[in-house]
Image (cartoon, helix red, strand yellow):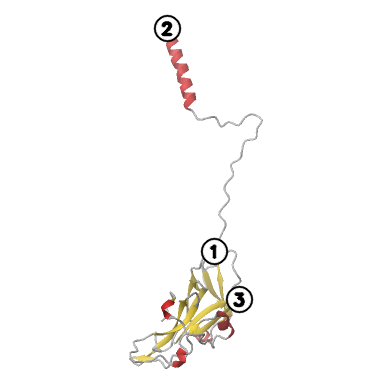
Amino acid sequence: MRTRSIISVLSILSIMIMGACSPPSTTQAEGEVAPRAVAPDPEPEVCNPSPGGGAWARFAGAECAWELREEGERLTLSSLSVDPSPPASGDVPPACLASTCVYYGVWTAAGPVLLAVVPSPHSEMPSDVLLGVSHGAQLAFTSLWDGAGEPAFTDLTPVGPAHALAPFWCDEGLALLAVERLDAVGSPVPQTLRAREGRLDPAELAAAPDQVSATGPVDRAGCRALDLPVP
């Protein structure tokens, strides 16, 4: 009898200990509605997916990628943001109608900037290089080689001018500055090219793409070249 009593006491103690270590019951009290599990709200979409092939250029932006697409004889530059600003649109440069240009893009503090490389039928080097910028709903291009003088030759093959304009970011603004493209020791920068140096006003460029003019001297010390593959 004593042995059975000891076993009974041990069994009661075991049950009490297990009850103390067990987690509290989650059983809903009778008459109360059990809470329903609610999935967290999905993260809001920031960028739209790309429509797919057909973009002439695609490049990263501040939040979402940008794409350049052709619609008829117009180029449209737009962001893939779910709440984008209106796209910028402009005519395909005439040189790019005659032969297919290669387009590049880069995001800058001034917004998207494009480069259009015009192929040459006589050389692997381009026949012209165009810079494209947007102003509101307008997209416009201007030549970086116009006014740079006659092309140089290598083995009787034209390789473009010895100097050209190149896009720079200078003290919170875009600028076009003359640079040396080729080894042109002793060859001065043509004055016709110097006359086109200066800050780049996108509104001016959109109004008159071929009339980009200097807007005063630019301190080159405060300038850095844009990350564009300018030939």
Mark 3 highlights which residue? 137
Q: CA distance from mark 1 to mark 2?
A: 79 Å
**Tag 3: Cα neighbours inside 10 Å, few (<14), some, or many (≥20)?**
some
Find numbered disc 3 in the image and state the secondary structure of the residue it sits on: loop
Find numbered disc 2 in the image and state the secondary structure of the residue it sits on: helix
In the image, which is nearer the foreground, mark 1 or mark 2?
Answer: 2
Residue 161 x %, y %: 40, 89
Residue at 60 percent across and 64 percent down: it is: 83
Q: Nearer the viewer, residue 34 or 62?
A: 62
Mark 1 highlights which residue? 49
Mark 2 highlights which residue? 2
Q: Is residue 20 above or below residue 91?
A: above
Q: Is residue 40 above or below residue 76?
A: above
Which residue is outermost to the top? 1
The quarter of the image holding the C terminus is bottom left
- Earlier sequence position, callout 2 versus callout 3: 2
Quadrant position of residue 9: top left
Residue 77 x %, y %: 55, 74
- Earlier sequence position, callout 1 versus callout 3: 1
Residue at 45 percent across and 17 percent down: it is: 11
Q: Nearer the viewer, residue 55 or 231?
A: 231
